[in-house]
Image: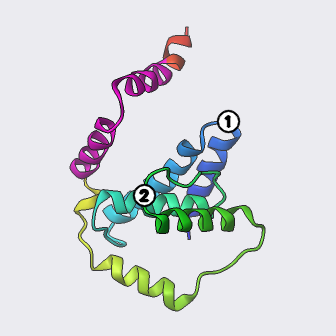
Amino acid sequence: MPESQTIERARRDKREVKSPSTQAGEFVREEFHHIREGKHGARSSKQAIAIGLSKARRAGVNLSAPRTGSAKIQRQAKRDSARGQSKAVQSPAPKRSRATLTALQHEGRNAGSHRAISRQVHRSAMNRSGAARSASAQKAAAPRKAKP
């Protein structure tokens, strides 16, 4: 279950008409904080990001399923999104929830380190074209240019 502060940050991003990926970033950020404070670990930075995105979908962030990835992952993402869009509140099964947390507690804590995250971000950026990277950099710089 995401923390109330995280949900509030995501809602504020939504009110400010920021993209769904920015809203979901709050949940990913929370996941990295959990790893750093020792609540649990993760096998890799990718896994930590995936957990955060799943939580975001379940919390109602309008994130689409990934374009790449296995059919199983896409099905699960669609299921998470459907759960987030429905008004019915379902509490997770306690036994399943405990099992997941216990499994994550056996994983290492390096996935949350600054070095692991920066390596993941760099790898992810290298998969994008130069034009796409340039466009997002210009988009990020636009508000700074607009300020007097």
Please tell me whether residue 131 belongs to the stretch shown in magenta: yes
Question: What is the spatial separation of the Cα atoms under label 2 and label 1, in whole angstroms?
Answer: 28 Å
Tag 2: residue type? Gly
Magenta span: helix, strand or loop, mainly? helix
Magenta-drawn segment: 114-141
Left or right: residue 22 compared with residue 105: right
* Residue at the farthest front position: 71
Say which residue label 1 marks. 17
Position of the C terminus by quadrant: top right
Residue at 34% across / 24% down in the picture?
A: 130
Camera sees residue 50: yes
Q: Pick the residue in front: 33 or 130.
A: 130
Say which residue label 2 marks. 69
Q: Quadrant of residue 111?
A: bottom left
Residue at 34% across / 76% down in the picture?
A: 104
Point out which mark residue 1 bears: none
